[in-house]
Each structure stands twice: as structure tokens, then as C-alpha cells.
Amino acid sequence: MGVPFETFLPYVIMVTMFGVTGAGLSSIRYYANDYKRPRRQLDIWDRQMMERDHRLTGKVRGQSDAVEAPLGFEVNSRWKAEPRIT
């Protein structure tokens, strides 16, 4: 005795909805990441360089080939709350 086709309809709907939401989420991540694939297995060095690139260019994935840093880069630090020891 075969399985009626009405039982496959909910499974097709579920698989389609999971596929649509997965594709939507991956495309949103792709567009939010400056049209590049997301980075994986980041270590401390990668995170420091991403933070530096963000301070230099304003984008986490942006990189600059300028020889000199822009004005205000030396005071644009993430350590704003620490007192300066002189």
C-alpha cells in the first residue's frame, strides 16, 4: 500500500521554508559583510586587525593602502577609559 501524496505536502512546505530562510540569512550576512564571505576561526590577531581596520576606514572589512594614517587616528583608540601614565 502506497503513501498518499497528501502526506508529502507538509514536508515539501517545511523543507522549502527552511531553504528560503537559510538562503535569506546567508545573503543578508553576505551583503552586511561588504559582499565578502564571513570570516571563520578568528584569533586574537585577526580581531585586533579588524578593529584597526575599522578605526582606519570605518568598515570592519575595509583595508587602506595609504602610507599615513588619517588625522585623529592616534587619539582614536579603543582604550579611552584607561588613564594615561606619564
Image: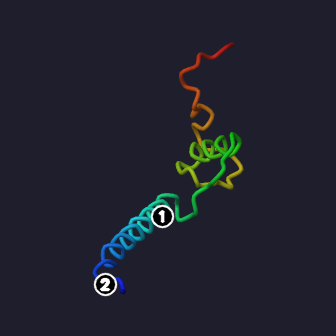
- Nearest the eye: 20 or 85: 20
Residue 26 spot, x, y in % from top left: 48, 64
Residue 85's disc is none
Q: Quadrant of residue 24?
A: bottom left
Residue 66 spot, x, y in % from top left: 67, 53
- Nearest the eye: 8 or 63: 8
Q: Is residue 80 above or below residue 1?
A: above
Residue 44 spot, x, y in % from top left: 69, 39
Question: For the residue marked with disc 1, what is the amino acid?
Answer: Ser
Which of the colour schemes (rainbow, by chain, secondary structure, one colour) is used?
Answer: rainbow
Q: Is residue 30 above or below residue 86?
A: below
Q: Residues within 10 Å of mark 2 (few under 14, many from 20)?
A: few
Residue 59 spot, x, y in % from top left: 53, 51
Residue sitting at x 57%, y 58%: 38
Residue sitting at x 69%, y 13%: 86
Residue found farthest to the top: 86
Residue found farthest to the left: 6
Callouts 2 and 1 close, C-beta under 8 Å: no
Q: Is residue 54 left or right of residue 22?
A: right
Residue 26's disc is 1
Q: Which residue is mark 2?
A: 4
Q: Secondary structure at mark 1?
A: helix
- Nearest the eye: 74 or 24: 24
Q: Secondary structure at mark 2?
A: loop
